[in-house]
Image (tube, rainbow, N blue to C red):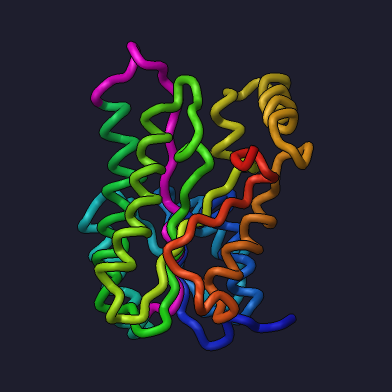
Amino acid sequence: MSNRLEGKIAVVTGASTGIGLATAKRFAAEGARLFITGRRIAELQAAAEAIGGNVTPIQADSGKLADLDALFAKVKADAGRIDVLFVNAGGGSMLPLGDITEQHYDETFDRNVKGVLFTVQKALPLLGKGASVILTGSTTSIKGTAAFSVYSASKAAVRNFARSWILDLKDRGIRINTLSPGPTETPGLLDLAGTDPAQRQGLLDYMASQTPIGRVGTAEEIANVALFLASDESSFVTGIELFADGGQAQV
């Protein structure tokens, strides 16, 4: 074990399942003290037990500013600073143009844009020189996807946040990067196909066929990339969009 995050304070939002959980486990294994969030308390507590180590679970909906205030008040009281902020909470559902509702738009942008914006802004007083902020993007931000335009647009907004914020913070030494997974086998992805096992496998098979590497990714593979961006090994990397997508969006 290399302990690449030894002594660092890390916050991972949306850590109950999938990429967030896998990344929190990896950060903990590398020596970080963790604060994790999730909207559902039972899943969040189960995640904390699975992560082990020095981890504090805090129930929070990133789209609600009062929840973010409570989160960072707890981090400030217990740790005093943030060295790594992985802004992973988010999600979305599918609706084609013509069927998009105001509720669908509001829910997607509240989770993926408003939540990201105010998570980072409210964390600023705790972020010091050398801190790493990682935003979760998506290959959909640069590719067209049928029935997924609202989600895709929200992730395009996240990508520009990183580009613009590094200019706003250029005198503070805070790095901000976007990590954009491709098709990754997570509960969130499988939920897009419903509950039928055959439909879920069909979705995975289709996505594998569209990926040059010939398969979908694992949450652990995305966590490996998040670890690089979180660690001092990426100390001269800021403002980028790092695709971990098996080549899907590169061809």
Residue 185 seen: no
Image position, residue 140 (x, y; %): 49, 37
Image position, residue 232 (x, y; %): 55, 81
Camera-nearest residue between 235 and 191: 235
Q: Residue furthest left?
A: 66
Q: Quadrant of the N terminus?
A: bottom right
Q: Height in image: 116 above or below 144? A: below
Q: Height in image: 33 above or below 149? A: below
Boundaries of the magenta span:
82-102
Q: Residue furthest right?
A: 214
Residue occupying image coordinates x 64% and y 46%: 245
Q: Is residue 246 left or right of residue 158?
A: right
Residue occupying image coordinates x 68% and y 30%: 207
Residue 132 seen: yes
Q: Quadrant of the C terminus?
A: top right
Image position, residue 81 (x, y; %): 35, 82
